[in-house]
Image: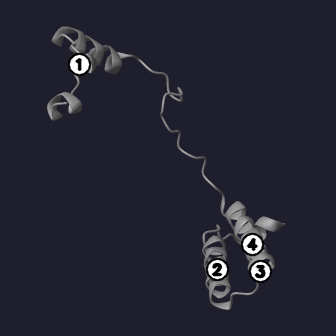
Amino acid sequence: MDIANFINPPEEAVEDSGDDLIDHIAETFSEAREPGEEDGEQQLPQPITTAAALQAVNLLVQFEVNERGLDLPALERIRRRITEVQLERAGSGKQTTIDSFF
């Protein structure tokens, strides 16, 4: 068997006319799609609140400690990041006078 026939067998040859190919491509890209339509299109994830993120991290810390034991360096890095996020959250609040509570 000739190597050229092995790589490109004549019985598997595909013959498309140029017009058919151009029409197919034009139809593919000219279809109007609705937002959120499922066709390989990924939707953006919903934003995660700081409270939900902190709750998830705390759950992860508990899981890691229970499953793998106490890994102090990793646990310390996670707790440091939790503290940073809590401080950012506390600092981003709106400061008001005490009169607004009365």
Question: Residue at label 3?
Answer: 65
Q: Which residue is mark 2?
A: 78
The answer to which of 61 and 22 lies nearer the viewer is 22
Looking at the picture, tell me which residue is in the foreground, 59 or 91.
59
Please, what is the three-letter code of the amino acid marked with disc 1?
Ala
**Which amino acid lies under the numbered mark 3 shown in the image of this protein?**
Val
Tell me where residue 25 appears, x and y as whole percent: 28, 18
Q: Residue at x 50, y 38 (%)?
A: 42
Quadrant holding the N terminus: top left
Q: Residues within 10 Å of mark 4 (few under 14, many from 20)?
A: some
Label 2 crowding class (10 Å Cα cut-off): few <14, some 14-19, many 20+? some
Which residue is identified by label 4? 58
Mark 4 or mark 3: which comes first in sequence? 4
Circle 3 Cα neighbour tier, 10 Å, few/some/many (<14 / 14–19 / ≥20): few
N-terminal of the two: label 4 or label 2? 4
N-term-proximal mark, 1 vs 3: 1
Tag 3, which secondary structure?
A: helix
Residue 7 figure quarter: top left
Residue 44 horizontal/vertical position (percent)? 53, 43
Name which residue lies at 81% across and 67% down: 101
Looking at the image, residue 73 sits to the left or right of residue 29; the answer is: right
